[in-house]
Amino acid sequence: MLKLTRAALSRPRFASTLTLSAAAIHTLPKLDYAYDALEPHISGEIMTLHHTKHHQTYVNGLNAAEEAYAKTETAKERIQSQAALKFNGGGHINHSLFWKNLAPTSEGGGKLQDGPLKQAIERDFGSLEELKKQLNSTTAAIQGSGWGWLGYNQTTKKLEVITTSNQDPLLSHTPIIGIDIWEHAFYLQYKNVKPDYLNAIWSVVNFNEAEKRLVEASK
């Protein structure tokens, strides 16, 4: 169960808002599709490892970090706990969004329909192809691991391309589409050729889910 909110993570002492009741234990979310449903764009082997191993590790780490934080007695111990809470909490939030971010081509993946999202993309980028170009180039340029995002700026009311490092969640914008550029997301299939992975993932982006996020953020 995903209980960490982006607003909570943005507070320096966000861990103090967390509880360890049975209902608050974080668990690995189920996918809405089979592991091999995104092939040939993302292999079933990658999806299986990414979901059951990497995301599960963040879930385990978050639960352990919360338990450790609950036992802290000094300010120093609480400060030391923040890194584990942020890293594993961010990993859990980002990946939970990422799975919803994708859909098999047979279920509409990669297809941008007429509607609020298409209109916003054309308004802020000129075209979907220009958005892909900007988001891909910005994401490929990340040094090390991180995420590329299409985010909605609540102040400007526009879509913008942003990146975050490591497993930091997107706090400055409402996430609309997120792309995981950690090596575990693509290396088994695309080796070190990031552009090939970034080009391929658009074929399984769940634009319907992205539009729902945009509509909600725009209210």
Image (spheres, rainbow, N blue to C red):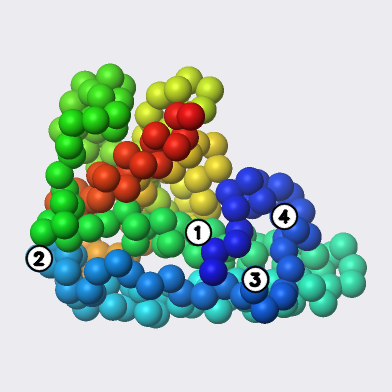
**Could you classify mark 4 by the number of other residues whose Cα lies within 10 Å: few (under 14), some (14-19), or many (20 or more)?**
some
Counting from the top left corner in percent of width and height, residue 93 is at: 50, 59
Q: CA distance from mark 4 to mark 2?
A: 40 Å
Name, please, the residue furthest toward the right.
Answer: 74
Residue, disc 3: 24
Mark 4 or mark 2: whose residue is earlier in sequence: 4
Mark 3 or mark 4: whose residue is earlier in sequence: 4
Q: Are marks 3 and 2 in contact (CB under 8 Å)?
A: no
For badge 2, the amino acid type reads: Pro
Q: Nearer the viewer, mark 3 or mark 4?
A: 3
**Could you classify mark 2 by the number of other residues whose Cα lies within 10 Å: few (under 14), some (14-19), or many (20 or more)?**
few
For residue 46, what is the image quadrant?
A: bottom left
Q: Nearer the viewer, mark 3 or mark 1?
A: 3
Mark 1 or mark 4: whose residue is earlier in sequence: 4
Per the image, label 1 sits on a secondary structure element best described as helix
Q: How many marks?
A: 4
Say which mark, if any, is on residue 93.
Answer: 1
Residue, disc 4: 14
Q: CA distance from mark 3 to mark 1?
A: 14 Å
Counting from the top left corner in percent of width and height, residue 138 is at: 32, 39
Per the image, label 2 sits on a secondary structure element best described as loop
For residue 34, what is the image quadrant?
A: bottom left
Q: CA distance from mark 1 to mark 4?
A: 14 Å
Mark 3 or mark 1: whose residue is earlier in sequence: 3
Q: Are marks 1 and 4 in contact (CB under 8 Å)?
A: no
Mark 3 or mark 2: whose residue is earlier in sequence: 3
Mark 2 or mark 1: whose residue is earlier in sequence: 2
